[in-house]
Amino acid sequence: MPEPLLLLHGFTQTGRGWDEVVRHLDGERYRALAPDIRGHGAAATRRPIDFDACVRDAVGLMPGPGALAGYSQGGRLALHVALAHPELVTRLVLVSATAGIEDAAERARRRAADADLAAWMEADGRRMTEVADRWGAQPLFATQSPAVAAMARADRLGNEPAHLAAALRGIGTGAMAPLWDRLGELAMPVLVLAGERDEKYVGLGRRLAAAVPAGRLEIVPDAGHALALEAPEAVAAAIEPRAEPPTRGATIW
């Protein structure tokens, strides 16, 4: 019987951001589901938008124990799901993810910056094309090929500025209480993926993998932050369970 696999997307994307990864998975082995998160796509109008509500949504889609993967925003949400319902998560895959901002002052600055961006998104007459272009122009995505950037932009255009603003306020990095001191509670195998060109998240990935009892970090060569689009075959291959359990904080190159 296929293993359930829930895939959680990043901010400004939709579940379609996982399409290429799903295409490379063994359809007979996995029953993959990539839902739209509140504030995005088909779930844009669902309220409230906060971590508790999004965790309930994710759990409601899980027919039983299975694998859980999340990219960026989805990775932070996946951590919340795994910590709240460890009995449902047999394997956890965190793609370009963090456990939050520990320093209170830095977190407050990020929350303020997120609030400013949300207000800009909600401005009268704001078009989704403007939002998509501003988000895609971040240095975080500077190493993307034109083809990958076009795919990411097309996916973003399935959203609406006001709903993304609500998601940014509710489940953005600035709104998230850090989870670093709880990572030791995760008993399931945890794979952390980061792109070689995404230096910030390579560093965060090392910390994540080292803090989890059964954690492993894999660096994807010649790739940046948006791994599900930039290296979908590598992400699909990484999701496959390993025959041997990982050692604590192991790094695979």
Image (cartoon, rainbow, N blue to C red):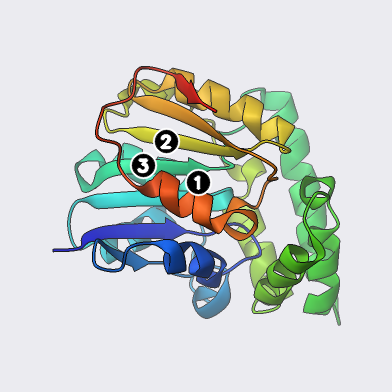
Q: Which mark is residue 92?
A: 3
Q: Position of residue 81 (x, y in %)?
A: 36, 46
**Looking at the image, is mark 1 or mark 2 earlier in the sequence?**
1
**In the figure, is residue 14 to the left or right of 142?**
left
* Viewer-side label of 1, 3: 3
**Looking at the image, is mark 2 or mark 3 earlier in the sequence?**
3
Disc 2: which residue: 191
Q: Secondary structure at mark 3?
A: strand
Q: Secondary structure at mark 1?
A: helix
Disc 1: which residue: 75
Whether 38 is drawn above or below 10: the answer is below
| Residue type at the position of mark 3 | Leu
Whether 21 is drawn above or below 190: the answer is below
| Residue type at the position of mark 2 | Leu
Are the residues flagged by discs 2 and 3 in contact, CB closer than 8 Å? yes
Q: Quadrant of residue 149?
A: bottom right
